Image (cartoon, grey):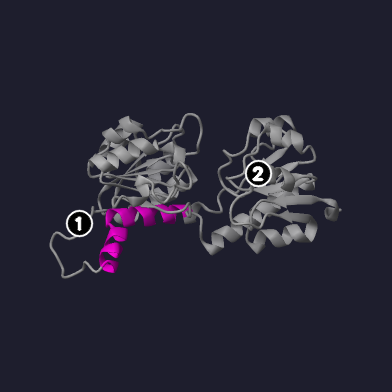
């Protein structure tokens, strides 16, 4: 039965996902490094029953109308802001994502960024490579203490909670802002819920773990950056537009915050000559929070399982709109 299905895969994904798809369907694979353009995506989706998509693939009602055979869109990501979910639900198209499997990798990555920014690791490496290291110096490349500092976690969902657990190993005071408070978790892990304004004012490190919605776009803008300590570090492991890029550039230039570390940016990718890329007090990495072999294998396997389950008429393991379709 499965051999009659044709599915599009909009980028090379690990074999853990490609192999089960190839065993059960005819796969149309986009094998280029850069994502398909809108026209190329249309050509790829032509005649397909389902698709594995990435955050770079914009799927709205007009795309779905041009490809009425599509029954399942399986997004290779936790987020799905690249997809118009209400439009898909109206057309009976299942939308899936890959939650949970990348939680630990993203939390670990958040801490890698936080520590690298706090201790100025990229600057220190550049200092050595450029031949500037002459001797040990009492004031050389001084960073910020992490142990016993205050961390403010904006968005205490799956990833935010794992970040909070790791903070206990550094004996940190943990603040959190989230409209949906989990009192049991907060009590067990010594987390204090506060307003966003209080979190920004009192935190030495602010980490972002919210979904991108109209309410969270530019959640951190000029006014919010002004509330932060001059010694504070901002870490964004959520979505680029959660932070107002121009306001962040201004804050880093003026020294109103100590530094920033970004897994995601707006726009994404940033051009090589962008101010954030070339500031010594800003770390920018290319959206690699989930980039471990194990995690990407799990993401690929779940994306494939979601797609195949939906095509079989079963409820996928991670369907965003199963109750609306």
Q: Mostly what secondary structure, the magenta segment?
A: helix
Residue at image x 38%, y 57%? 112
Is residue 31 positioned above or below 189 on the image? below
Under tag 2, what secondary structure?
strand
| Span of residues in magenta | 106-130
Q: Is residue 148 visible?
A: yes
Instruction: Measure the C-alpha gap from mark 2 to mark 1.
Output: 45 Å
Under tag 1, what secondary structure?
loop
Is residue 250 positioned above or below 130 on the image? above
Tell which tag, 2 or 1, sits nearer the viewer.
1
List the single residue furthest toward the front.
273
**Residue 310 found in image quarter:** top right
Q: Out of 54 and 316, give the one closest to the viewer.
A: 54
| Mark 2 / mark 1, whichever is N-terminal | 2
**Residue 314: which numbered mark, if any?**
none
Residue 263 lies, in percent from the top left, at 43, 50
**Residue 96: which numbered mark, if any?**
2
Side (left or right) of 87 relative to 272: right
Residue 261 lies, in percent from the top left, at 36, 49
Residue that label 1 marks: 142
Residue at image x 17%, y 70%? 134
Judge the density around disc 2: few (<14), some (14-19), many (≥20) Cα neighbours within 10 Å: many
Residue 232 lies, in percent from the top left, at 26, 44
Residue 167 lies, in percent from the top left, at 35, 52
Q: Out of 262 and 188, give the one closest to the viewer.
A: 262
User: Any magenta on residue 187?
Assistant: no
User: Any magenta on residue 126?
Assistant: yes
List the single residue furthest toward the left.
138
Side (left or right) of 236 relative to 100: left
**Residue 183 found in image quarter:** top left
Q: Is residue 323 visible?
A: no
């Amino acid at each position: 039965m499965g051999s009659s299905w044709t599915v599009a895969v909009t980028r090379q994904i690990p074999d853990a996902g490609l192999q089960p798809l190839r065993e059960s369907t005819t796969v149309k694979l986009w094998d280029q490094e850069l994502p398909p353009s809108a026209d190329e995506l249309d050509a790829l989706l032509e005649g397909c029953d389902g698709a594995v998509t990435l955050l770079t693939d914009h799927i709205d009602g007009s795309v779905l109308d041009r490809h009425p055979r599509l029954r399942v869109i399986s997004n290779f990501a936790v987020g799905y802001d690249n997809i118009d979910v209400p439009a898909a639900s109206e057309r009976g198209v299942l939308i899936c994502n890959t939650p949970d499997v990348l939680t630990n990798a993203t939390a670990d990555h958040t801490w890698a960024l936080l520590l690298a920014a706090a201790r100025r690791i990229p600057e220190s490496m550049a200092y050595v490579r450029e031949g500037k290291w002459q001797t040990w110096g009492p004031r050389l490349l001084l960073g910020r203490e992490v142990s016993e500092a205050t961390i403010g976690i904006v968005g205490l969902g799956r990833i935010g909670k794992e970040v909070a657990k790791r903070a206990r190993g550094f004996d940190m005071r943990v603040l959190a802002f989230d409209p949906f408070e989990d009192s049991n978790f907060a009590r067990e892990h010594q987390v204090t819920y506060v307003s966003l304004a209080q979190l920004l004012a009192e935190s030495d490190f602010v980490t972002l773990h919210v979904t991108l919605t109209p309410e969270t776009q530019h959640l951190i803008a000029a006014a919010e950056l002004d509330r932060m300590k001059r010694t504070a570090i901002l870490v964004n492991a959520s979505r680029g537009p959660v932070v107002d890029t121009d306001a962040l550039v201004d804050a880093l230039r003026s020294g109103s915050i100590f530094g920033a570390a970004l897994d995601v940016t707006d726009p994404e990718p940033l051009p090589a000559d962008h101010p954030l890329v070339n500031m010594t007090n800003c770390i920018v990495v290319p959206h690699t929070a989930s980039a471990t072999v194990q995690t990407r294998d799990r993401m690929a396997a779940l994306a494939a399982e979601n797609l195949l389950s939906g095509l079989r008429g079963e409820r996928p393991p991670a369907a965003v709109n199963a109750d609306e379709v």
